Each structure stands twice: as C-alpha cells, then as structure tokens.
Image (tube, grey):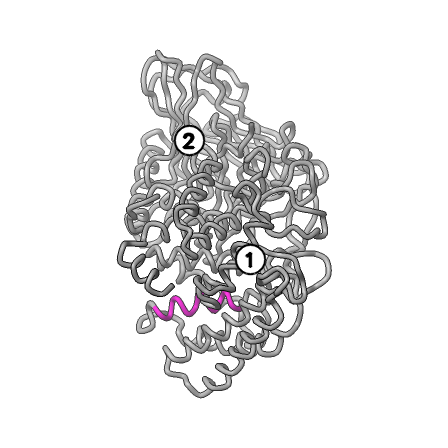
C-alpha cells in the first residue's frame, strides 16, 4: 500500500520529496511555491522524476541522519552497497547570513563492492505544461522549456553525463555526486565541494537540533516533527507553509484537493507557538515580522492566508493536463480560500503575540508595532465578533456562528488584556475586560446544547466538531470542568472511528468526509489526557504514531479503513499537534498528578 512513503529535504527556501526507493517525485525551484521541476507525485506518466534504479536483487532502506534533514537511502545486494545522501544545502556563511541556494544535492557514497545503477533523469519544467528538452553540454546537463514560459534547470555530476541522460548502467568505484540547480554555477562543482556542503549542512541541522530540549519520552518523534516544521518555514519573509505540496487528495478519487504551499495565519501561528516553546525564538521573531509587514494600515483586516512572499491575491487555477495523485483530479495551483472570512485568526495571532511578549517583554523587537497590531485587532474583533464566518474548516457554503471562531474572538480580547498589563497600557483595560466577559457569556449561552450535553459546532446546532476541543487549550474552560469533560466524551462517541477522529460528521460542500483529519485525533488524545484518562490517551497516541510513514512523517489525513496517509504532505498542522501531545505526556511528573487530583 502506498503510504506517502516520502522523505522531505529542504533548506527553508524550497523542498523536495524523495521516495523510499530514492526517486525525486516532487520538487519546485527556486522556491516552495514555484512551478514544479519534478511532479511524478501528481502524474505518474508525464510529471517528471529523478530516479535511482537498481537491479531487483538490491534491498533499499531509508532513514534520516539523526537530528538532521539529510535523507539517506541505502542500496545493497549483499556484496555491493552504496548510499545516496540527499540534502538541500543550508549553512552559515562567514558574513553571518545563510547559504541556501535553490539546489538539490545527491551525494553518492560508495560503501563496498562495485555497485551498479541507472539514472532516470526526466525533468518536466513548469508543471509539465509544455515540452522540456534536455541537452548535454561540456560542464553540465541543461533542461529547458519555452512552451508556456522560458525556464531552465542545470544538472552537474561526477558521472558520465551522456550515460546519465541516456539511462545507461553506471558503476560506482568511489564517492560521486549529482547537483540539480536552478542557476548555472560560476564555480564548477566537485565531489569534494559537494561533500563539504553535506558536512556543513549536517552541522547546521545538528546545531539547530541541539537547541531543542530533550524529553524523557518520545524525544525522537518530537525532534523529527520539529525539524519537519523548520523545513516548512520560509527564511526570506518568515512565512510558514501549511505543507510542501499541492492537490494531494483528502480521499482518493475525490475533489478535496488544495494547494497548501501558502502561509495560513492560523496554521503558522500555531506552529510558531510550538517552535517558540521548543526554544527556537528566531523562527517566531521572523514570523512576527512577516505579520507586521502585512498590516501597514491600522484598520486593515487580516486575510486568512498569504503567499510566502506576502502576496495577497492567490488566484486558484487547475492544471487539467495532470492526472492527479492516483488519478484524483483536479490539480490546483493557488487557493480561492484566501477570500474567505474567518474570525478565529485574530485570536490565534494574538495568542502568539502574547506568548512572545510574556517571554521576551523586555527585549522583544518591534514591541511598539505589536502593541499597535494588538489595538487594531481589538478594534476589528469588537466590531465583527457577532458576525458569522466560514470557520476553521473553510466551508465554501453558507457562513455560520461557529463556536471555535467565537472562542478565538474571546482569546483575542483575553490576550489583548494580558498584553496591556505586560506593557502597562491600562487606559482601555476596563472596556476590553467587559468585552471579554460579554463574548464568554455569549458562548456559554449559545454554543452549549443540553440535548447533546456538549459545546456544538455552531450556535443552535446539534452537530459536534473536533475544533471545540481547543477551548481548554486556549484557556477558555478548565479541563476538569464538567462541561468540558462531557464535551470530550460526546465527541468521542460521535466523531471517533477506531480511535481516529472526523472533523465533523454533518455534510459539507462535498458530502461526508471519509478520512480522519490527523490534527483532530491529536487534539482528542490531548483532551483525554487533560481530563484524566491518561493511560487511554497514551495508548491511543502510540497507536496513532504507527500510522506515520516509514520515516515518522504525517500528512493531513488518515484513511479510516486502510490507515494510509492522505492529503498534503508533510503537514505542519499534524506535526505541531504531535509535538504538543508528546511534550504534555513527557512533562507531567508525579507532583503535577498529585496537584491535579487535589483539584478534582
């Protein structure tokens, strides 16, 4: 069964997905959201790939170099063994910046014997829209297209270039390399230089990983998830991507296929909060600057999402010539959801701003701009919190009064009050505190349903929704509150399917979802843990971990029946929730358990 058996490599500028057999099936250059160079992931026949092919008697194993983003694929038939070390260069320059060129390096390491392999090198530029022609030159192989628009990529290698392009058999007698670059190199690459880049990139990741705390449980999973989140951050602007791919379907053969190579304020803010908790404050600092740059006007409403270079218009189109992942059309580029109204994003952003100010109040950069944004958000929320919206799940039908959106409006004001106290700006405290209480009362009055004994998806509804589990995480309600505990149990009864959660079960624009939204399962596990069902939560967490791919990576969704991964990949949402669960399980000590039992 195909389980999205890919590893991700990247350098905070772009990324590539490499299959468990060493095939580059997805890569966009020069940046995450550029058009694809390889897109076999979205069309097996015409998408294009960069494959390492060996005889059938070879076994292939894949792993990450510990605490790095270097992916190692090992090929062996017993007598002959070699490895491909895939990475995108990223390391410190002597001038203080980062060296992160739009390149994929494939270091070929000779282990023993005289292993043989063939290369299938088949770039298809510009999403394979037109013909890509490949030419062997003196120092490199160049591929170009000019059907839709002019574009080129360059391949450098220590192997015979004609043999590579023609797919002839190659023998490995010593270490070698392939370097795929968006730009022509000024200095000719050598095996020694590629090896040096590999070692420097390893050191960069080891240093980065070393700043992540170690935990007494699930440390390996926390580290891999943290590195994955870092790989989805875009250094140039501070944006954080929802995922590295477009149009991987939530259900095979259906049309819930979206482009996730953008920065959703909600997803990114949640990621940033987790990353800051893990000690990576530079990621948080860059993201807050991204937000400051997006809001030049004090009364400008936030969009729910932006392009990674701060683009505000993300027009959605379809690539009808591509068959889609396992024939799941359409393949989309752009995302029409950018025009939606979602009132929860203000609370999620305020929560991040408050967390940063609480930690670094004396030394945080841009404190005055953040205070200005805080006042602006309170102004917007005070005027719009009573209005319906599209909600966290971006329903493309009618707007409703979603409970999650209302709770996050409360969060926006609650955190604004706390920020005002931190900064000793007390002039509007009384007014803001009254608004906070008004929103809280409104939620308790309209979102609670006595018949189902739970907070429901929207005002006046009987439908349940996994997002209301976050009420407790955001401090709206205590975990041991009878209302919250009964909500968790009602959600388990209604939305759990063999331990995996539906987002909701009422029909949406596309009918009833048939896959589990991975983050919802982690939210549920966290909630079980918080209400005291700790053994059950840990058992379910460990079961859910087995649904990750061979490298421990998760996509957006999990199929209820087959447990295969579905949806865009790797998904930031899924990995941030995995980290939250694992950290909560790991942090809890005997003293905390005693205190909790005393509160009951």
- Which numbered circle lies on residue 167? none
Number of on-image labels: 2
Q: Residue at 50% across / 62% down in the picture?
A: 484
Q: Nearer the viewer, residue 362 or 420?
A: 420
The quadrant in which the N terminus is found is top right
Q: What crowding class fits label 1: few (fewer than 14 Cα within 10 Å), some (14-19), or many (20 or more)? A: many
Marks 1 and 2, the one that precedes in the sequence: 2
Viewer-nearest of discs 1 and 2? 1
Q: Nearer the viewer, residue 533 or 123?
A: 533
Q: Quadrant of residue 245?
A: top right
The quadrant in which the C terminus is found is bottom left
Q: Which residues are magenta?
A: 346-358
State the residue position of label 2.
Answer: 106
Q: Nearer the viewer, residue 181 or 491?
A: 491
Residue 345 in percent (x, y) is at 55, 65
441 relative to 159 in the view: left or right: right
Residue 44 in percent (x, y) is at 62, 29
Q: Residue at 61% across / 65% down in the picture?
A: 450
For mark 2, give the secondary structure.
Answer: strand
Q: Is residue 276 above or below residue 145?
A: below
Q: Identify the residue at the far bottom of this view.
A: 427
Q: Is residue 378 one of those drawn in magenta?
A: no
- Which numbered circle lies on residue 467? 1
313 relative to 353 in the view: left or right: right
The answer to whether residue 31 is visible is: no
């Amino acid at each position: 069964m195909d389980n999205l058996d890919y590893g991700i490599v990247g350098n905070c500028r772009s990324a590539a997905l490499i299959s468990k057999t060493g095939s580059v099936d997805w890569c966009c250059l020069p940046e995450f959201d550029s058009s694809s160079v390889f897109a076999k992931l979205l069309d097996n026949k015409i998408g294009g790939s960069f494959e390492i092919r060996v005889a059938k008697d070879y076994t292939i194993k894949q792993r990450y170099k510990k605490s790095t983003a270097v992916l190692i694929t090992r090929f062996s038939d017993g007598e002959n063994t070699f490895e491909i070390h895939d990475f995108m260069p990223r390391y410190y320059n002597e001038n203080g910046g980062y060296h992160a060129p739009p390149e994929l390096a494939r270091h070929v390491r000779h282990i023993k014997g005289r292993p043989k392999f063939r290369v299938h090198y088949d770039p298809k530029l510009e999403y394979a829209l037109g013909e890509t022609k490949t030419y062997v030159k003196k120092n490199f192989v160049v591929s170009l297209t000019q059907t839709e628009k002019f574009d080129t990529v360059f391949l450098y290698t220590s192997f015979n270039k004609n043999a590579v392009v023609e797919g002839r058999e190659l023998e490995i007698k010593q270490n070698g390399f392939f370097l795929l670059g968006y730009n022509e190199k000024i200095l000719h690459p050598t095996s020694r230089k590629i090896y040096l880049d590999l070692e420097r990139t390893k050191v960069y990741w080891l240093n980065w990983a070393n700043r992540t705390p170690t935990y007494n449980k699930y440390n390996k999973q926390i580290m891999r998830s943290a590195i994955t989140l870092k790989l989805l951050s875009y250094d140039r602007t501070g944006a954080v991507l929802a995922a590295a791919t477009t149009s991987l379907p939530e259900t095979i053969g259906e049309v819930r296929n979206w482009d996730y190579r953008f920065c959703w304020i909600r997803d990114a803010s949640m990621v940033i909060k987790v990353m800051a908790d893990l000690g990576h404050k530079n990621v948080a600092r860059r993201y807050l600057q991204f937000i400051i740059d997006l809001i030049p006007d004090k009364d400008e409403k936030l969009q729910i999402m932006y392009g990674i270079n701060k683009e505000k218009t993300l027009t959605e189109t379809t690539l009808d010539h591509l068959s889609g992942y396992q024939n799941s059309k359409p393949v989309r580029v752009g995302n029409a959801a950018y025009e939606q109204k979602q009132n929860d994003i203000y609370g999620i952003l305020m929560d991040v701003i408050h967390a940063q100010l609480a930690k670094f109040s004396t030394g945080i950069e841009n404190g005055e701009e953040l205070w200005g944004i805080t006042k602006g958000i309170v102004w917007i929320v005070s005027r719009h919190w009573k209005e319906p919206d599209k909600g966290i799940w971006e329903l493309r039908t009618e707007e409703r009064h979603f409970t999650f959106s209302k709770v996050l409006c409360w969060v926006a004001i609650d955190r604004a009050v706390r920020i005002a106290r931190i900064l000793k700006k007390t002039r509007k405290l009384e007014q803001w505190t009254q608004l906070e209480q008004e929103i809280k009362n409104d939620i308790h009055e309209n979102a609670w349903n006595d018949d189902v004994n739970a907070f429901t998806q929207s005002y006046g509804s009987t439908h349940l929704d996994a997002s209301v589990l976050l009420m407790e995480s955001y401090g709206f309600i205590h975990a041991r509150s009878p209302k919250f505990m009964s909500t968790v149990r009602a959600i388990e009864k209604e939305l759990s399917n063999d331990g995996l959660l539906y987002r909701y079960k009422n029909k949406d624009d596309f009918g009833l979802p048939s896959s589990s939204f991975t983050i919802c399962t982690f939210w549920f596990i966290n909630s079980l843990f918080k209400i005291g069902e700790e053994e059950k939560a840990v058992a379910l967490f460990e079961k859910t971990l087995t649904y990750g791919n061979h490298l421990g990576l998760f996509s957006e969704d999990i199929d209820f029946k087959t447990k295969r991964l579905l949806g865009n990949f790797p998904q930031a949402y899924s990995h941030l929730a995995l980290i939250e669960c694992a950290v909560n399980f790991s942090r809890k000590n005997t003293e905390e358990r005693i205190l909790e039992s005393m509160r009951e």
